[in-house]
Image (cartoon, helix red, strand yellow):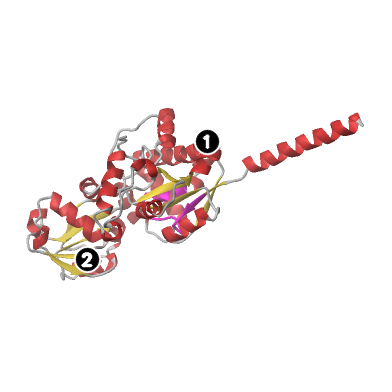
Amino acid sequence: MGNSYLGRTLLAGLLALGLAGAVAAEPFRLIITDLETPLVPNSVMDLAEKLGYFEAEGVEVELVRVQQTPSALAALQAGEGEMANIGTDALLQLVLGGATDLRAVTSPNKALPFLIAARDGIDTPADLAGASFGVGRVGSLDHSLSMKVLASQGVAVDGLEVVTLGQPSARAQALAAGQIDATTMSIGVWSAMPDKTGLHVLIGQDDYFAAAPVVSKVNIVTQATLDTRGDEVQAVIRALTKLSRTFADTPEVWVDAVAAARPDVERATLETLAVAFRESWSINGGLSADELKYTTDWLYQTEDFAGKPPVALEAWVDFGPVDKVLTDIGTAPGLDAQTR
């Protein structure tokens, strides 16, 4: 009887160890909103998996691909992933709606890659006085942000002729056709324009973000994930931060990686983008209290947040995982400042 009991005990112990190992071996699922490798710094998540950076940090990451933030949130809330890359505004809306267990822990691509392009003859922002400026729609993200950027440059934005044109490609075409004097577009749209004769970049993306440092997207986890898989959260952040530093220091590494993933894109375009992104990578994790506060202040000036109660930073951000990673690997000099 004693031997039988001992056997059952050992078997139970082995089964328990096996189950624990199975749980530990479950992949860490990262929900992203790109169905293919994107031509923006958010590509670091896709490429960290392809280039083995997650594996090097001892975490098995499975990418869960969905379309847009609402689907990413639905997947996270349904337990289909441990971390999700979503719009900052959507996270704040959830917190306002009563969610108390969601935390932003990093931002691999905090800055929208916006720039302002203009026709020749508009050589400085001051030359835009009384000019026509193309926007998606009045009140859209590109409109409201660009007005802040131009105002910071001393432009009397009330004197602009604002022209509603819809999508960035339509605005680019209108600019090329001489129908407007200037407009906002992403660096990707600018790079893809087949003919830029008579056009130039008036305000580059680094200066654009410096004038309006809105953190557009963050990676969030639940408190339960932080409590049970905190080491893996840190490993993911460490991998993304290390690869971001590699791309910042050696842009051709990004070009080679994206060229392999996106053979549909000309290498010359990727090389142009790599140079443009050199200061855009989240080399210190992408979370700055100053930038996040600016983001919330700006959001509360928009129609979606008008009249809603303020949300404290600690209600939706946890700097702890990033800070632990930076304690481990150090802080890199650059535009990704870490304020607390």
Sequence order check, earlier mark of 2 and 1: 2
Tell me where the magenta segment starts and ends, as one range: 30-47
Q: Do tag 2 and tag 1 residues touch (Cβ < 8 Å)? A: no
Q: Is residue 34 magenta?
A: yes
What residue is pinned by disc 1?
231
Tell me residue 290's x, y (percent): 27, 40
Q: Quadrant of residue 150?
A: bottom left
Element assignment for label 2: loop
Tell me residue 175's x, y (percent): 19, 66
Q: Quadrant of residue 3?
A: top right
In the displayed structure image, the side of residue 223 where residue 123 appears, left or right: left
Image height of 206 relative to 157, above or below: above
| Residue 138 badge | 2
Element assignment for label 1: helix
In the displayed structure image, the side of residue 329 where residue 49 appears, left or right: right
Under mark 2, the amino acid is Val
Please tell me which residue is depicted at 67% across the width and 39% down the height of the picture.
21
Foreground: 223 or 189? 223
| Residue 320 badge | none
Please tell me which residue is depicted at 42% across the width and 35% down the height of the picture.
320
Cα distance between the residues tagged 2 and 1 = 44 Å
In the displayed structure image, the side of residue 148 where residue 5 appears, left or right: right
Tell me residue 28's x, y (percent): 55, 45
Label 2 environment density (alpha carbons within 10 Å; few <14, some 14–19, many ≥20):
some
